[in-house]
Image (cartoon, rainbow, N blue to C red):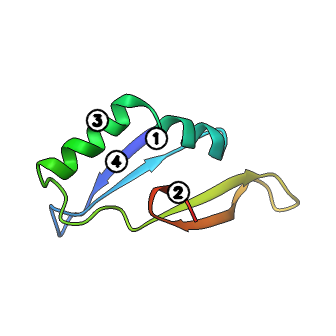
Amino acid sequence: MKKGAKSTTDPTLFLLYMEWRDKACFEAHIATPHVKHAEDRLKREKMLIEPAKEWHFYRLVDGPQGRGYKNSESTSRRGRP
């Protein structure tokens, strides 16, 4: 699942929210040709002032308090430590 959101005060600021079954699925997705093509175009046409600085990975957990998210990892660019 992918969702996007744009700042209400800064039209150049946006967030891309993606939900994946696991980190391996995410890594496989970002290695696909269409993602590489999009990244190359963003860089070539200078469409971003600066690239994503960080990625946060959360794992959905069930527990005594019910469903929630547990931070499983925070990493630098492209989901890699």
Q: Amino acid at mark 1?
A: Ile
Of the residues under marks 2 and 4, which one precedes in the sequence? 4
Q: Amino acid at mark 4?
A: Gly
Q: Which residue is mark 3?
A: 37
Q: Amino acid at mark 2?
A: Gly
Q: Which residue is mark 2?
A: 79
Can residue 42 be seen from the camera position used here? yes
Q: Residue at x 31, y 53 (%)?
A: 5
Tell me the quarter of the image containing the C terminus.
bottom right
Q: Which residue is mark 4?
A: 4
| Horizontal side of residue 52 vs 25, given as left or right | left
Q: In this rendering, which labeled residue sits more in front, label 3 or label 4?
A: 3
- In the structure shown, which secondary structural element does the residue marked by tag 1 occupy? helix
Can residue 1 be seen from the camera position used here? no
- In the structure shown, which secondary structural element does the residue marked by tag 4 occupy? strand
| Labels 2 & 4 near each other (Cβ < 8 A) | no
Q: Is residue 42 above or below residue 13?
A: above
- In the structure shown, which secondary structural element does the residue marked by tag 3 occupy? helix
Q: Is residue 22 above or below residue 54?
A: above
